[in-house]
Amino acid sequence: MSLLSHRIGWVLVVACLMMVAFPSILWAQSDPSEQAWQKDYGATHDQRMKWWRDARFGMFIHWGVYSVPAGVWKGEESKHIGEWLMLDYKIPVAEYAALTPKFNPVKFDADQWVRAAKEAGMKYMVITAKHHDGFAMFHSHASPYNIYDATPFKRDPLKELADACHRQGMKLGFYYSQAQDWHHPGGAAAKGGHWDPAQDGSMDEYIDKIAVPQIRELLTNYGPVAVLWFDTPVNMTPQRVEKILPLLKLQPEMVVNNRLDKNKLTGDFSTPEQKIPDTGIPGKDWETCMTMNSTWGYKSFDHNWKPTERLIRNLVDIASKGGNYLLNVGPTSEGEFPKESVERLQEIGKWMKVNGEAIYGTTASPLTGLTWGRCTKRETPDGTTLYLHVFNWPGDGKLVVPGLSAPVESATLLAEGKKLEANNSAEGVVVTVPTSAPDAISSTVVLKVKGKVEAR
Ligand code: FHN
């Protein structure tokens, strides 16, 4: 018995020594390692996520040299997303790089982009600093394959955007394709790998010579970076992830998505793409990223625009499930947002001016299965505010919140501040509303009740 406990003691001592010597064992092997992730870098997860949880709505920008062909290669219209053109047509590295002299986005106006996002009610922007095609949209010293050195534009749009964001009080984030890089030797390529010998090389060297220095540049030269958004962790072994992790400490307040490593062991939030999870992702922070048409990077012939009604209702739906909405714009090669995106942003902005209170800083709905729409919640020291987002306005003037038994304090129409009558009843709370909806897309009734309202 004493021999056994002696042995156990030694095993524990050795295990502790290993963890001190190789701390990565902790995060690499413990259960999805969120705790280790939180300990591992900068401020705690909750501290870093505070502004992000309040924000609820951000702009994704996919902009790169792929906006020049705009989805067309040798006269053929690509059926796939625009930024994948190089891989989809297996365009040789040199031939694709020959697009760069044609990229001269002289109409780019950083302040205008930030203003457009701000007026839409968005609180942060995440722009592609380098997408899978390997072309850096900033003045990188790690590779001349960047917008400053390789195009007639000779400007650093990320610097201009960072300055405009800081001037206008907008949070800025960078998207960085850390693994896939179809230009630099050793960069990964999904869907069957390299198609040009120029792409062959050591991925470890690519990580050391391109990804690591470029991420360092992004986190050093552009002021505060609010979000780092990794993507497609093809061949991202724990060793390669290890090379990138220490860089995150350069921006200790920054939040990071969950696509750095292929097992999704790292990151502050999950990233459902082009979909809204039915019941949110309970116990996790998450952000749905979505296109306004069918492509991320600009395609001249993609007219599959989602109506504003859908975009607004998506935002409400996502907020009601406790998530964020990162809505994409794919600017043209001249540096402008497509006019269809501008129109939608303006319409969403009009709605947000009236209804933003029911989105920002709210939490998931405690009520589900609401036939007329969605609900978001804000807890106050003396009770709970429920924002009832009504998509289908009741024709009979009675809005029923089924099963809600908390005593009603007040009900108001958010749009006009008009007081409404509301009563507790056997079927739930019944709010008497005007016969026509204040907003055809989604009208908000602010219902204040006593105490907490827990999910049911
Ligand atoms: O391959 C990319 C795609 O081009 C786009 O950037 C989206 C945005 O989330 N992410 C990848 C696919 O998951």
Image (cartoon, rainbow, N blue to C red):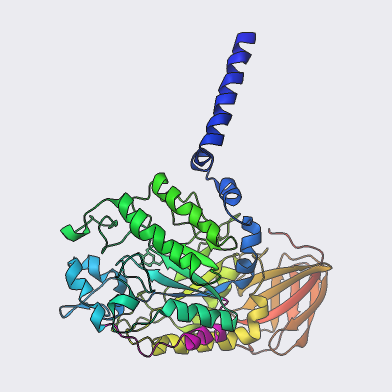
Point 42% across, 45% down: residue: 238
Find out whether residue 88 is within the magenta segment: no
Query: Quick check: which quadrant has ligand 1?
Result: bottom left
Quadrant of the image occupied by residue 384: bottom right
Q: Residue 451: horizontal and vertical position, in percent?
A: 82, 64
Point 59% across, 65% down: residue: 321
Q: Residue 210: horizontal and vertical position, in percent?
A: 35, 60
In the image: residue 115, left or right of residue 230:
right
Above/below status of 440 relative to 408: below
Looking at the image, can residue 205 be seen?
yes
Quadrant of the image occupied by residue 302: bottom left
Quadrant of the image occupied by residue 181: bottom left
- Is 81 in front, or is 445? 81
Q: Residue 120: horizontal and vertical position, in percent?
A: 54, 84
Find out whether residue 116 is within the magenta segment: yes
Tell me the magenta residue range. 103-123
- Is 186 in front, or is 227? 186
In the image: residue 223, left or right of residue 339:
right
In this rendering, the count of numbered labels is 0
> What quarter of the picture does the C terminus occupy?
bottom right
> What quarter of the picture does the N terminus occupy?
top right
Q: Residue 249: horizontal and vertical position, in percent?
A: 55, 57
- Is 37 in front, or is 452? 37
Looking at the image, can residue 91 be seen?
no
Point 58% across, 76% down: residue: 123
Point 56% across, 83% down: residue: 118
